[in-house]
Image (cartoon, coloured by chain):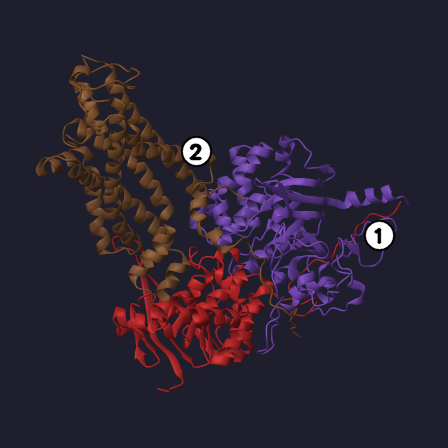
Amino acid sequence: MTTTIEPPRTAGAPGRAAPHRARFRTARMLLSERRTRVVLALLVLLVLVAFVGPLFSPYGPNEQNLLDRLQPPSAAHWLGTDSLGRDILTLVLHGTRLSLLAGLLAVGTAVVLGTPAGLLAGYRAGPFGAITNTVSDTLLALPPLVLALAIVGAYGGGVVPAMLAVGLTLSPRFYRVARSVAATVSKDAFVEAARSIGCGTTRILTRHVFANAVAPIVVQVTFSIGLAIIAEASLSFLGLGAAPPSVSLGTMARDAFTHIREAAFPIFPPCIVIAVIVFLFSSLGDGLRDAVVSGGRRT
Amino acid sequence: MTVTEEQAVGVDTALMSVRDLSVGFRRGEAWVPILDAVSFTVRAGEVVGLVGESGSGKTVSSLTAMGLLPRPLEVAGGSIDFRGRDLLTMDPKQVRDLRGVQMSMIFQDALRCLNPAFTVGDQIAEPLRVHRGMSRAQARARAVELLELVEIPRAKERASSYPHELSGGMCQRVMIAIALACSPRLLIADEPTTALDVTVQRQVLRLLVRIQREMDLGVLFITHDLGVVAEICHRTAVMYAGQIVEEGPTEELFRRPRHPYTHGLISSIPRPGEAGGRFGSIAGVVPKAGQWPAGCRFASRCAHVERGRCDVGRVPLEPTDGTDDTTRTTGEVPQRVRCVRTRELSLEGVG
Amino acid sequence: MSEDVVLTAEGLTKTYRLGRFGKREPVHAVRDVDLTVRRGETVAVVGESGAGKSTVGRMALRLVEPDAGRVEFEGVDVLGLSRTELRRLRPRMQMIFQDPFSSLNPTMTVADSVGEPLLVQGGTSAAERHERVADLLVRVGLDAEFGERFPRELSGGQLQRVAIARAISTSPSLIVCDEPVAALDLSIRGQVLNLLLDLQAETGVAYLFISHDLSVVEHFAHRVAVMKAGELVELGDTRQVFDSPRHPYTRSLLEAVPRIDFGGEGAPPRSSAPVPAVQPR
């Protein structure tokens, strides 16, 4: 008495757009808000200016002109000169470039140190997780700059050791985010399915867990770049980061601060630029995080 | 008898009358319809089943009737009459006064619908205090009575329990008690037993039937489970792709389905007592909202489709006995089908 | 030990401890369950929620470590294998999950997912896999071009077919089906169930079929194991269990299934349809 109703052909669901459109789903989801796209565009512009700008500058970053030191903004020097007569606008461009690279180094270190451990701890609760949790919590409890100072003090100054130290202090954030997201994703059936077909832990963590955990980690990256740039500026301001002939926004601020009684203006450019960069990265982070939470704009 | 007088007769017996309800949402420039001129009626003392699978629109229908349509869905047309007044045009405050008092609802996941921070007794008492102005003591006493009505043992003690201390079946009974607190005329039940074990489901269904009879409730019962429909619904409406494709007395629907989709659904139910054999099914997939074809929406999956007849133009929902609104003489709700070929087909039923 | 037996489970037990400090009572999710599954046979494990049937299925594949008991698969002592040896055994025993929407990685195409067991197993080139995936998709009733799509573009029934294609890709001798049609629409279930029946007839694969839906089990399984609260209360041929159940729990389960029975002896009480009292004026 059971009858089967079977029209001749196997019907498939009406096809959607071409498959490669679906491939960039995460990116499209993250950038669904207009505000996010605007901020990202501004950041890209900033980065372009910082890297390409110096080529257009008539001055070198270390071109000193002691006769013209601490001049206010003029036609020749749009942002004036610093205590050694160097053109501040040129310095700002070079300094921004260095600060951005430093930020990337710090965040890169943090990602490498924190993310794999977090993914593994989230995927598999166990003794490994207990150990890494403790390490992470301890790092979080230490004031980041103090730790960075200690490391840099031990190894001597310089941007690279400073940023590695900052990266270490930022790594617990990535550990936590990765662990939390991995724990959630690991509950999905496809992770268990991956185990049941014989995938090894590495493949499961990379192809299955991480691939579905990218969005929150990207959000964390954007927030952390802002923090890293402030950290670099702070360390350089204290004389423990970039050293001459390198120029960073922090060294510029230090220089301007030292000579503040002679000229009030030079402290503004580096500080404003730092503020703008951090603001843009934070806004980007906000926008991305909102997109992750809301899953992108509804159809 | 004039048409208007006779229609007035029909309206008087109806608790809730949904007419030509259309719901959808905007996607960019386009309008995506989800419900397409859906009409059904629930009268006092009868249980009406609304059956459908994914993409049928039954959930959206019930949400609209309850006034719980989530954004971005919006009503594009039609009316929902409750005892003569259109809910869609009423003042929101008036709708709120109606809800919980004359018209109440129960949902699928009882545990999630109950507030974990309050005892079940308090939660049952709440509508009594808000809508009936009872004092704390009065409401509490009535709550215990209601717990007894829904057959919860040791009602007086249980009133002080918290939702997480109760089983799924008991939570569902508590939700029924809350829904019945102010003696509503109409109960909307949205898949109330779907998440329950089959033995618990049987108990809860028995309870619902008993209460419905005692209180002469009208019930709109939304479900995908045909077995449940066969057991407790007097009349049933079958939905497919945003439309009602067949409606009528339940027994008649099962014994003699008039629409190929209904027939397909019934054939998909594994028949007890038969050994082995293949399972019935309907090949193909439901067309997605926004991609509905002109003409019969079931045509691509129908074994009885005829090109040139089934795929041209909108298929109307019409009474099976050939009558229409102008010639019907009683307030009876007629059996209706949305199929061009229904008079030529002889579809096998069950029972 | 007959060569026909694919899976033997003895004394399977899994205990969870509630409470952090071990003071609370242990909860027996599964206690002392024995099962055998032969080649080409379907053994159903039925019961209500919390009965432990899913846990039994997972212990049979050692996706969950049993606390006690023995599992022998095609003559191999599964519980004694190292992690690497176990991974090598996996292609022979596969699983289909309940929720079709979450059992496929959303960032992988259908073809990637279906081909993954072969990739992990090793020994095939990308071109060979590509061809095999196309064959598998056609075998489960989907067009080969579905391989380029992502899971979110497919319906529940189609996703479950993809999951089946993935499961049979390595020609396993046993597939554990964990409520494979529970999340699907009624009219689609038959498509998937008939596909499973056809595959069994063609390849002789055995199924351990976990379900709470007795009406499906009656038509699908050769033998039925009934579980209640972690224990196996009845085990026998399907016809026997359904026609003359021995255990009272089995009887209450069978009786609770909604029936389509108008006016019959066993029909539950229904009010008669109300006749409107209004008369034409």
The circle on residue A38 is 2
* Label 1 residue SS: loop
The total of numbered circles placed on residues is 2
Image quadrant where one finds the N terminus of chain B: top right
Residue shown at 24% from the left, 41% from the top: A105
Residue shown at 54% from the left, 70% from the top: C193
Pinpoint the chain carrying mark 1.
B
Chain in brown on the image: A
Marks 1/2: CA–CA distance: 60 Å
| Residue A61, quarter of the rendered image | top left
- Give the colour chain C carries in the figure: red
The circle on residue B324 is 1
Spot the residue most to the top.
Answer: A262
For label 1, the crowd category at 10 Å Cα-Cα, with few meaning under 14, some 14 to 19 and many 20 or more, is few
Q: In the rendered view, tell whether residue B323 sits above or below residue C130.
A: above
> Mark 2: which amino acid?
Val
Q: Is residue C44 left or right of residue B104?
A: left
Residue shown at 85% from the left, 45% from the top: B6
* Label 2 residue SS: helix
> Mark 1: which amino acid?
Asp
Q: Position of residue A282 (x, y in %)?
A: 35, 33
| Residue C112, quarter of the rendered image | bottom left
For label 2, the crowd category at 10 Å Cα-Cα, with few meaning under 14, some 14 to 19 and many 20 or more, is some
Q: In the rendered view, tell whether residue A264 sits above or below residue C232.
A: above
Q: In the rendered view, tell whether residue A200 sits above or below residue A175.
A: below
- Give the colour chain B carries in the figure: purple
Spot the residue most to the bottom.
Answer: C2
Please indicate, yes or no, whether residue A22 appears anywhere in the rendered image: yes
Question: As rendered, which of B177 and C196 lies closer to the eye?
Answer: C196
Residue shown at 62% from the left, 66% from the top: B283
